[in-house]
Amino acid sequence: MTQSRIGQWSSRWLFILAATGSAVGLGNIWKFPYITGENGGGMFVLMYLGLILVIGIPVLMAEIMLGRRGGQSPVKSLEVVAQESGQPKTWGWLGFAGILTAFFLLSIYSVIAGWSASYVFRAFSGAFAGLDAQQIVMMYDSFIANPKQLMLWHTVFMGVTALIVSRGLQNGVETAIQILVPGLFIILLILVGYSITTPGFKEGVVFLFKPDFSMITASSFLLALGQAFFTLSIATASMLIYGAYLAKNASIFKAGCSIAVLDTLSALLAGLAIFPIVYTYGLLPDEGVGLVFKTLPLAFGEMPYGRMFGGLFFLLLVFAALGSSISMVEPIVAWVTQRWNIVRVKASWLVAGLIWLVGVGSVLSFNVWQDYRLFGRWNYYELLDDLVFMLLLPLGGLLIAIFAGWFMKRQFSFAELEMPPALYSLWRFSIRFLAPIAVIVLVIVTFM
Ligand code: TRP
């Protein structure tokens, strides 16, 4: 451990802000509300909260801890930590797996983020006004059927991400995050403020918070587990690299809890902003993937000041997605600069360019390549989506937990986490038993 660390946040607050920016993303504003809508509301929320607490926070802490202990780019960090505990350097592959996951995830994430960016302009310009449900759906269908449009927004989104990351940790990432994260919470509060005044508010709150115990099923439980991992940005090397930049004297326990609380708060606020509107305009909460792009625009088209509220809503999505995309590029760029000795600016554009290229396939999957099936089953987008969500993310989470719990020496994790012994034991119990068992069950059931 002679090598110096590769970077440091200007303050621990900026670490929390950046990690929150990573955690709060499309998963919170787009996915959480729609899977909650499809899985009965309150009961799902309750399971999700429990899983965040019992498994999400411990694994998040583990990943930050591994990053800080190593203090290098993701692959190297894991090598350093493994060797310190007398384990083979091959654990570095786990860092590389995280990098690959981030790479593929961002290639599809950017496409959806691009849709959101396009909808910002539609909303502000009043494009939803006076349209009926069918016309809104048509607008969406014709948009995603247009490869040029999708390509444009995918390109813009990746370009902005590259620009930010290329400017460095302090000038780029920190500066952007200080605008994006407070900005997104302010927008959320404005939207919730509006929601409170709508007649559907009570119904929305009841839907979101009233647990209906008949809704506990194995599949909703597993969905909640996957969401808990995804929303905390676990297993994509993001927390490894953000942890590597964290000062040695900062408490990982406090940071982990703050990140999880802010992340959960944003998801709940998004739900509070969305469901009352859905009920006020007599729409359905369980429209799935289309909730944000097909259901909400209808309401924005009707409500007073709908242009403004609609525009703000999609801007919120873009802000959230940007904070996340930065944190997916950063670990890869850190690895490329350290491993290949390339300067950051070049590395950023190179990495973003490659991700963009892989993303082009996803853009085309919604139109030109829609019916082009790989292995007779998936189209390109679906293949990457399943690869990331069914394989890479759960496996990455599992291996991080197993490495931190079973292979890293207890004395090192104890020293790094600096928690009261009782809390530390709880953390260790979760990391060694609860998290691995939960993920293994998740994987088995997924493939059954
Ligand atoms: N947490 C992000 C969200 O909720 C998604 C995500 C998963 C992510 N892994 C990540 C974002 C890694 C950035 C980096 O949308």
Image: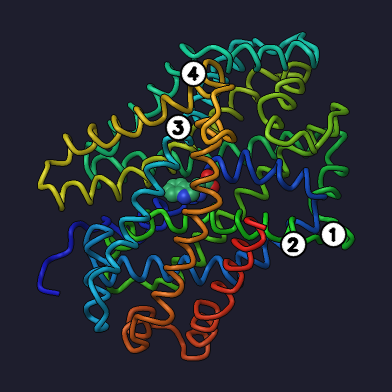
Whichever of labels 1 and 3 marks the residue nearer the N terminus, that label is: 3
**Would you say residue 21 is visible in this rendering?**
no
Whichever of labels 1 and 2 marks the residue nearer the N terminus, that label is: 2
Whichever of labels 4 and 1 marks the residue nearer the N terminus, that label is: 4
How far apart are the alpha carbons under marks 3 and 4?
A: 10 Å
Query: Which of the labelled discs sits on residue 46, or is there none?
Result: 2
Q: Is mark 3 within 8 Å of ligand 1?
A: no
Residue type beneath disc 4: Leu
Query: Which of the labelled discs sits on residue 110, or is there none?
Result: 3
Helix or strand or loop: what does disc 1 sit on? loop
Density class for disc 1 (Cα within 10 Å; few <14, some 14-19, many ≥20) is some
How far apart are the alpha carbons under marks 1 and 2?
A: 7 Å
Pointer 4 and pointer 2: residues touching (CB < 8 Å)? no
Label 1 belongs to which residue? 211
Residues 221 and 442: in front is: 442
Residue type beneath disc 2: Leu
Pointer 3 and pointer 4: residues touching (CB < 8 Å)? no
Helix or strand or loop: what does disc 3 sit on? helix
Label 4 belongs to which residue? 150
Residue type beneath disc 3: Ser
Q: Residue drawn at (38%, 73%), measured in percent from left and top? A: 251
Density class for disc 3 (Cα within 10 Å; few <14, some 14-19, many ≥20) is many
How far apart are the alpha carbons under marks 4 and 1?
A: 39 Å
Indicate the quadrant where residue 176 lies: top left
Whichever of labels 4 and 2 marks the residue nearer the N terminus, that label is: 2
Pointer 3 and pointer 2: residues touching (CB < 8 Å)? no
Tell me: 206 left or right of 446. Answer: right
